[in-house]
Amino acid sequence: MDFAVNFLIKSAIKYKKNKLIICMKLVFATNNANKIEEVKNLVSDNIQIISLNEAGFMGEIPEEFETLEKNSSQKAWYIYHLLGMNCFADDTGLEAEALNNAPGVYSARYSRIGNDTFSNLDLVEGNICKLLDNLKNSGNRRAKFRTVISLILEGKEYQFEGEVLGIILKEKRGNKGFGYDPVFLPDGYSKSFAEMDLKEKNSISHRYLAISKLVGFLNNL
Ligand code: ITT
């Protein structure tokens, strides 16, 4: 009986190309639907990504620390304790060299920090406008996206990191992707992340690099 319950909580069965595949269920502890879509496209067939909605959780996840490492860890442990299911969380920040790595861990709410005019704009628009404004007199537009993933597996934590280097454009380009994608031009490419389709962004992004490490780790267990 214990085995059956354990199996139901931790595993799922997929039917693909006339084959039954037993896969590991992993809750992705995020409220960001774009991240879920990106990650569902990245993992191998033996992993089933469960969103918080699918797991029946509708609330906010706390993010109270000042580093990506600590925040991703906090998010993952919070959901693990709440749902009792293996899970992982991703914390991502855009780090601009000339701004001492800001917005960094504050990327999601950059325009809402401090008392500035950008707080009147839509959140994402405000974040981008504030970033461009803070860089307007700087000769250094180097930046990187950095993702830290914390995986909690059977009560043990593992972290995986991915980063992609590039520059912050002077104006927005493209309307795909999300967040800061329209102003980020990855090194070696002529398209911003928001001009790339999901497949292309997913072949080079910070999240792809971190997820690949997580998948590699799970496949070697
Ligand atoms: P969760 O904490 O629920 O996962 P979030 O949107 O708050 O969702 P993060 O704190 O990790 O996620 O990310 C902070 C912000 O960084 C996010 O809101 C976006 O504005 C931006 N961001 C993250 N990943 C990005 C990506 O791949 N492309 C562009 N912007 C991204």
Image: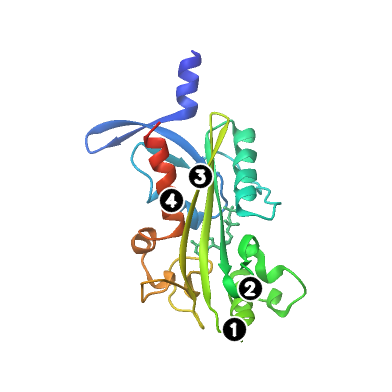
Q: What is the distance, in whole Å, between disc 4 and disc 1 at their CAs?
A: 34 Å
**Label 3 sits on residue:** 51
User: Mark 3 or 1 closer to N-term?
Assistant: 3
Marks 2/1: CA–CA distance: 9 Å
The amino acid pointed to by label 3 is Ser
Amino acid type at mark 2: Leu
Q: Amino acid at mark 1?
A: Ser
Q: Position of residue 99 (x, y in %)?
A: 63, 73
Is residue 134 placed above or below 206 in the rendered structure?
below
Q: Which residue is mark 2?
A: 99
Q: Disc 2 or disc 4, which is closer to the eye?
A: 2
- Asked whether disc 2 touches disc 4, contact meaning CB atoms under 8 Å apart, the reply is no
Q: Which residue lies under the disc numbered 4?
A: 39
Q: CA distance from mark 4 to mark 3?
A: 11 Å
Query: Compared with residue 48, is residue 191 higher up or lower down, i.e. above or below?
Result: below
Marks 2 & 1, CB-CB < 8 Å contact: yes
Instruction: Look at 22% across and 38% down and name the residue there.
Output: 17
Please give the label number shown on residue 138: 1
First along the sequence among labels 3 and 2: 3
**Considering the numbered disc 2 on the image, is that residue within a helix, a strand or a loop?**
helix
Q: Residue at x 34, y 60 (%)?
A: 199
